[in-house]
Image: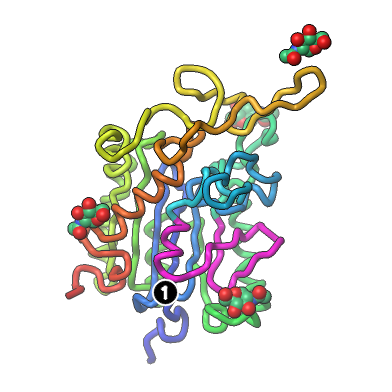
Amino acid sequence: MEPRHSRHIKPGLFIWMASLPFIPIILAAASSCDFPAIFNFGDSNSDTGGLSAAFGQAPSPNGETYFHHPAGRYSDGRLVIDFIAESLGVPYLSAYLDSVGSNFSHGANFATAGSTIRPQNTTQSQSGYSPISLNVQSVQYSDFKKRSQIIRSQGGIFETLQMFPDILGQFSDVVTQIYAVGGRTFWIHNTGPVGCLPYSLDRLKEAVGQLRKDLPQAAITYVDIYSLKYTLITRAKEFGFEQPFIACCGHGGKYNFNSQRRCGAKITVNGTEVVIASSCKDPSLRIIWDGVHFTEAANKWIFEQIVNGSFSDPPVPLKMACHGSKHP
Ligand SMILES: *[C@@H]1O[C@H](CO)[C@@H](O)[C@H](O)[C@H]1NC(C)=O
Ligand SMILES: *[C@@H]1O[C@H](CO)[C@@H](O)[C@H](O)[C@H]1NC(C)=O
Ligand SMILES: *[C@@H]1O[C@H](CO)[C@@H](O)[C@H](O)[C@H]1NC(C)=O
Ligand SMILES: *[C@@H]1O[C@H](CO)[C@@H](O)[C@H](O)[C@H]1NC(C)=O
């Protein structure tokens, strides 16, 4: 029998930032380090336009630093996933939900902001939660699988790609599934300290340890984003950042954050709309963008720290991740 991976997954990078409870995960599976495509799953930290496509653009001043207009991202500029794409020579990922100008020949992004595991019983305007909960993402994903047959005519990765992982399986199940169809490189990325329970990280690390035993041919890299973001926030000054706890774009309160008046919020004064939650003077000196998400400057700094493998276990650079600890 020929090796299964030669039939199913050709070189390509599957990045997965899945929003299991408080555990965004980056997962990469490929048979070589030449990655012509990226597939990403996750939440607002890696949403390149999913929620915006469904509910209208993330308002200005989102996007102001790099794109100079709102670009579907909850940041003033690029996200870590954008820096990853740049470094691998792949175009920025189109959001699966975005029907305008999208091109999936180098991958797709399923991440959407504000998603929850449980289906929502309120509207977004009532609760602020996205109705694109995991069961909805499941429907989208299964649709994408079926219709990817059609977009194969666009060329690129779709000419050869025949199987996609079930993103809703348990983390370990998904890794095992990708492994079964030939995936041999996994880049697992834990989350930052915002809202993250340390016991979740322990569970993730345990799961990774078990997977290493169960999938002996896989190169599994665990990236400790938690420690890195913690370090960034607690030692901000050292790295050239100011006011690590204060949102750059927001309105009011001790932290320039009010959940009713988030970044870009407007009020009507005497019949005229006025933005009351606007950007700070210099976002490049700030870490927290809108009280929840990171600035482009912080995202870039984070990317620069993780790309060479210094926060990875084993300490393998991203581009060498397909070789795992066996790299020269
Ligand atoms: C999509 O992008 C690829 C690579 O950048 C390009 O070759 C192709 O022509 C694009 N497809 C469309 C429909 O724009
Ligand atoms: C919506 O869900 C919440 C949390 O599960 C529950 O407390 C509430 O009663 C539900 N509301 C309705 C209208 O079903
Ligand atoms: C709104 O209009 C009233 C009446 O013209 C004026 O007194 C008030 O100062 C205006 N408020 C603002 C915030 O411009
Ligand atoms: C990785 O890159 C960071 C940022 O450029 C640098 O501080 C660190 O020393 C590098 N680590 C290794 C192991 O090369």
Split into quadrants, the picture shows ligand 2 in the one at top right
Residue 120, image x and y in percent?
A: 63, 38
Which residue shows up at 29% across the image and 68% down it?
321
Residue at the outermost right position: 271
Q: Main secondary structure of the magenta part?
A: loop
* Quadrant including the N terminus: bottom left
Magenta segment: 81-110
- Residue 12 painted magenta: no
Which residue shows up at 33% across the image and 69% down it?
185
Give the left or right position of residue 286, taking residue 319 as reference.
right
Which one is in front, 209 or 289? 289
Which one is in front, 240 or 152? 240
Which residue shows up at 47% across the image and 30% down it?
247
Under circle 1, the secondary element is loop
Above or below 140: residue 12: below
Q: Amino acid at mark 1?
A: Phe
The colour scheme used here is rainbow
Give the left or right position of residue 245, taking residue 321 as reference.
right
Residue 2, image x and y in percent?
A: 38, 91
Residue occupied by mark 1: 35
Residue 150, image x and y in percent?
A: 68, 78
Which residue shows up at 30% across the image and 46% down it?
203
* Quadrant including the C terminus: bottom left
Residue at the outermost left position: 328
Residue 229, image x and y in percent?
A: 32, 41
- Residue 97 painted magenta: yes
